[in-house]
């Protein structure tokens, strides 16, 4: 159950009521919100006199549910806005990992020439082997900050574990919680207290219910700027890296109020499939796309097989605008 307390309730009164109702509490402009288990179907008598309105939900997909809030949440990332009544599709592009100043500058030049607003690059990489490139870490974050300064892009970079979550929150314009970190409650809770938009990726073994409930950890912490990212789930198929769950995307669009971003690169895992898959995703009318591109994918230090060359990215990008326009969207 979600409870909106009356406007004049003090923080200490809200804490007292939260304890009575066994609720999580956070403050939203002007009033406090309490969230209890979705099993609660009626208001606690002690809380009732202080309640402005309340919402009974079917499952613990609560703050993210369109039963609670019909309109897709609006998320502002500095100069750009997605969700709300904007029909925008946020383009997020760049290499899997930041590798050098030269490499990221080349990526920045590509984005600038196409008018793309948001540059991605990982600094703390959640690799499957400890013996491979692990990312440039803090040095990479500083380089990305320099690129933002120079070009004015929004920067998105991922958090791998609790050791650097604060640093990523400080440096990034959008904090990416990677697929493997989706279940990390320390990261989710820390991001719930941050005042930065968060892109939460779906773990490749997570059901839609588990995925959206992970987002509830962030939302109920008081950070309501959450985007969901479908990036492929693991199925019996081995010819592609993962299977992009477009049925799941249809579910998320219908039942949640969070903007939905699609990552075609990690789903496919192979560059040849990314342009077609991206076109299919744009046709679904999504709030964002995440695509990896590298100046020389052959020598990329991570995800080499799936990164588009800049030429291939450019060619693909030209075909995306008319499809976006056909579904009433604008690429930003
Ligand atoms: C990435 O974005 O480079 C990445 C590691 O993605 P995922 O967490 O989806 O595997
Ligand atoms: Mn990658």
Image (spheres, helix red, strand yellow):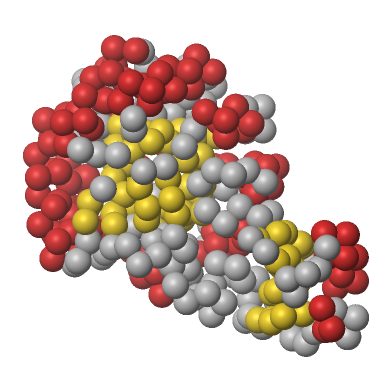
Residue under the point 61% across and 71% down? 62
Q: Is 290 left, or right, of 198 in this rendering?
A: left
Residue under the point 17% across and 46% down? 275
Measured along the vertical axis of the image, is residue 257 above or below residue 186? below
Residue 263: x and y in percent read 34, 48
Whether residue 228 is visible, yes or no, is yes
Residue 102: x and y in percent read 29, 12
Whether residue 18 is visible, yes or no, is no
Q: Is 300 left, or right, of 63 in this rendering?
A: left
Quarter of the image holding residue 52?
bottom right
Residue 116: x and y in percent read 24, 39
Image quarter hosting the N terminus: bottom right
Residue under the point 37% across and 17% down? 99
Residue under the point 57% across and 77% down? 68
Residue 141: x and y in percent read 48, 22
Q: Is 48 left, or right, of 197 in this rendering?
A: right
């Amino acid at each position: 159950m979600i409870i909106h307390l009356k406007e004049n309730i003090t923080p200490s009164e809200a804490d007292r009521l939260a304890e009575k109702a066994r609720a999580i509490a956070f403050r939203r402009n002007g009033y406090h919100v309490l969230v209890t288990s979705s099993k609660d179907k009626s208001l606690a008598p002690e809380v009732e006199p202080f309640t402005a309105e309340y919402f009974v939900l079917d499952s613990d997909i609560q703050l993210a549910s369109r039963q609670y809030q019909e309109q897709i949440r609006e998320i502002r990332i500095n100069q750009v806005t997605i969700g709300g009544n904007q029909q925008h599709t946020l383009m997020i592009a760049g290499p899997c990992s930041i590798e050098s100043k030269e490499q990221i500058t080349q990526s920045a030049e590509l984005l600038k020439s196409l008018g793309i607003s948001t540059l991605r690059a990982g600094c703390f990489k959640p690799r499957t082997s400890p013996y491979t490139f692990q990312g440039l870490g803090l040095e990479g974050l500083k380089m990305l900050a320099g690129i933002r300064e120079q070009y004015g892009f929004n920067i998105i970079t991922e958090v791998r574990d609790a050791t650097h979550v604060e640093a990523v929150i400080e440096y990034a314009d959008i904090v990416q919680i990677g697929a493997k970190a989706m279940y990390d409650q320390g990261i989710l809770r820390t991001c719930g207290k941050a005042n930065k938009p968060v892109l939460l990726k779906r773990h490749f073994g997570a059901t839609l219910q588990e995925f959206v409930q992970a987002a509830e950890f962030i939302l109920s912490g008081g950070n309501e700027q959450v985007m969901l990212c479908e990036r492929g789930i693991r199925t019996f198929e081995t010819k592609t890296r993962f299977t992009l769950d477009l049925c799941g995307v249809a579910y998320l669009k219908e039942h949640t109020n969070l903007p939905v971003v699609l990552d075609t690169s990690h789903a496919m895992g192979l560059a040849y499939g990314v342009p077609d898959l991206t076109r299919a995703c744009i046709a679904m009318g999504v709030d964002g796309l995440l695509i990896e591109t590298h100046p020389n994918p052959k020598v990329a230090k991570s995800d080499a097989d799936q990164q588009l060359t800049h030429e291939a990215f450019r060619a693909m990008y030209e075909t995306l605008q008319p499809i976006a326009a056909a579904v009433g969207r604008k690429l930003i």
